[in-house]
Image: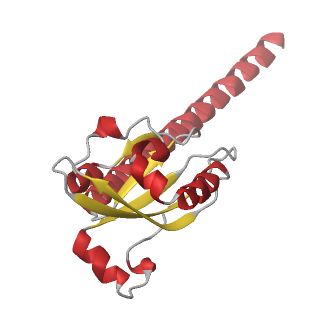
Amino acid sequence: RAEQALLKAYDELEVRIVERTRELQREITEREFTQASLLRSEERFRDIAEAASDWFWEQGPDLRFTFISRRFFEVTGVASEDVIAKTLMEFVAPEQLAEDPQKWRRHAEDLENRRPFRGLEYPVKNKHGQVVHIMISGKPVFDECGLIAPKYKRKAIEDQAMRDWQQGHDPDDFTMTS
């Protein structure tokens, strides 16, 4: 009788092991599918970002640039070491900061308080000494824990386009927040 009970328990355990193994295999397959889908989605986003006329960037919680898409460097001619690991205030030319200190103080407050902003325009000199006008809008993105993970979208507007814009076009024609 004890032997029969032991064999029955053994058989039940075998069935549970087979069932759980199948469940784990399904979970693993689902996880692999989800990871592959995520990788494809990230790749599509990178392809779109690289093909776009705009560029994207990320700043860490300390508001230092951690990523800027390649398009920024193509359009502006600025070297990555001149921007990555710097804050926007460190990147912007001192004469720009001095020209309109209130504008930059308001922008710094927006960033520090994690507020979205729109239509911030300033010129940047590229490596050839040409001025490229930049107009940016940004919106902070928070992770699932509520921590800041800012991601923004920028667009460069060359001199002629900037003059055209100044003659009455809406800034929304040139900016979009992500």
**Which quarter of the rendered picture does the N terminus lie within?**
top right
Residue 21 horizontal side relative to residue 43, left or right: right
Q: Nearer the viewer, residue 175 or 32?
A: 175
Give the image quarter of residue 47.
bottom left
Q: Nearer the viewer, residue 147 or 37?
A: 147
Residue sitting at the far left: 128
Is any atom of residue 31 visible in this view? yes
Residue at 38 percent of width and 38 percent of height: 84
Is any atom of residue 34 visible in this view? no
Percent x, y for residue 116?
A: 59, 62
Q: Is residue 174 above or below residue 120?
A: below
Give the image quarter of residue 174.
bottom left
Percent x, y for residue 85?
A: 43, 34
Residue at 42 percent of width and 71 percent of height: 175
Q: Nearer the viewer, residue 94 or 55?
A: 94
Q: How many marks?
A: 0
Percent x, y for residue 30?
A: 50, 45
Residue 81 horizontal side relative to residue 110, left or right: left
Q: Is residue 156 above or below residue 143?
A: below
Percent x, y for residue 12?
A: 71, 27
Residue at 30 percent of width and 39 percent of height: 80
